[in-house]
Image (spheres, rainbow, N blue to C red):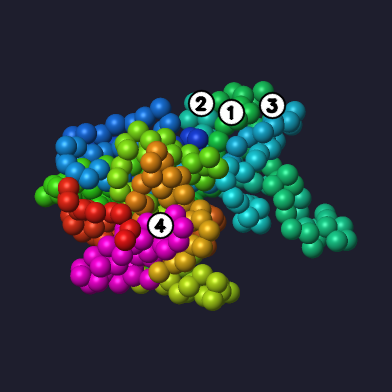
Amino acid sequence: MESRSLEFLKRLLDEPGPSGFEARAARVWREEARLFCDDVRGDVSGNSLATVNADGSPRVMLAGHIDEIGLMLTHIDEEGFLYFAAIGGWDPQVLVGQRVRLLGRGGDVPGVIGKKPIHLMKGEDKEKASKVEDLWIDIGARDREAVGARGLRVGDAGVIEAPVLELDGDLVVSRAIDNRIGAFVVLEALRLLAEDPPRASVTAVATAQEEIGYSGGGARTSAYRLEPEVALVVDVTFATDSPGVEKKELGEHKLGGGPVLGRGSAVHPVVFDRLVAVAEREDIPYTISAQARYTATDADAIYLTRAGVATGLVSVPNRYMHSPNEVVSRSDLVMAARLLAAFVRDLGPETNLVPE
């Protein structure tokens, strides 16, 4: 990965952007897009879009969601302790004792997640798993008024305070891997395509609210607006090269093993076959993941938009998903971007996407 792209990745991962509060991360994405693309904009749903060759054919959408799981304040008690709900799917056990960054009106406010010490628990309570409602956030405030003076109120969001970390080899650690790296990959693919524009019109979209997108989130609204004929969604999937993960259920996907190509009801068969052909031609290693019913990604919202969109799913293996320390390989990000760019370059007005 080039140093320019690595620095962009780090900036993007460190900026907070829980679902519904993606503006700061989206701003970083759009600033980078403007370095090589003239047509960059946001929309009312919080999506960010950048287009190359707007008049080309067919219309292609590259989608990666930019939101992350987070926390939302639900109550502030008289003593100044803050209670919260989960934004997205948390395992409450990983929240205990974490440092947090709350997004207040006057700036970010640091805090810690508290829980009754085990020494003070009695009997079976010591063995019970923590629930979100058992936890609270302590910002050091004396009382409720002091919390308000820090610019915090009910409904404010927060994230775990876990800056980007690099491990041995090319591994990157962040709380926001899922799925800030999808937004990163689609923009890196657009950067490659901008150097030599394809025949297709291609728009990279950093979609909003995927983690809470039970009705399709920003992927649905942006696909409705763009009317793409083809879409490639980039998300993360479970890496199965760490202890305790069942390969018989999930397949065999290793960090550094290349992108994972989804196959299932939401994935268009022609797009899947073309992705495989491009990967083999370009010597990009890949594995296949089966999604028999749905993908649990933006693909589920996009492929049924309007009259239907020929949609593919390209995933990046991720360890420790929905934790403060998710782990991916930089080489997988590079290979995924190369695959998307090569796929788009093969498309033209004559491309037939009707299954036969």
For label 3, the residue is 144
Contact between labelled residues 2 and 1, with CB atoms less than 8 Å apart: yes
Task: Give, as a three-letter code, the residue at label 4.
Answer: Val
Q: Residue 65 versus residue 330: which sits nearer the camera?
A: 65
Determine if residue 100 is in view.
no
SS state under label 1: loop
The span picked out in magenta is 258-287
Q: From the viewer's perspective, is residue 239 above or below residue 149?
A: below
How far apart are the alpha carbons under marks 1 and 2? Answer: 7 Å
Name the mark on residue 105.
Answer: 2
Closer to the chain start, of discs 4 and 2, is: 2
Is 49 or 230 nearer to us in this picture? 230
Nearer the observer: mark 4 or 3; the answer is 4
Per the model, the C-alpha gap separating discs 3 and 1 is: 10 Å
Tell which of 328 and 63 is nearer to you: 63
- Residue 79: % across, % down: 74, 31
Q: Quadrant of residue 51?
A: top left
Instruction: Give the mark toward the camera: 4 or 1.
Output: 4
Instruction: Answer few, some or many: residues within 10 Å of disc 2's Cα (few below 14, many 20 plus, some between 14 and 19).
Output: few
Report crowding for label 3: few under 14, some 14 to 19, many 20 or more residues within 10 A (C-alpha): some
Tell me what residue is drawn at x 69 percent, y 38 percent: 83
Determine whether 109 is above or below 189 in the image.
Answer: above
Residue 234, position in %: x, y? Answer: 37, 54
* Residue at which label 1 appears: 152
User: Which amino acid type is shown beneath numbered disc 3?
Assistant: Arg
When asked about the image quadrant of residue 133, the answer is: top right
* Alpha carbons under labels 4 and 3: distance apart: 50 Å
Say whether marks 4 and 2 touch (CB < 8 Å).
no
Q: State which tag comes first along the sequence, 3 or 2.
A: 2
Which sits earlier in the primary sequence, circle 3 or circle 1? 3
Q: Which of marks 4 and 2 is in front?
A: 4
What's the residue at 30%, 72% (across, down)? 285
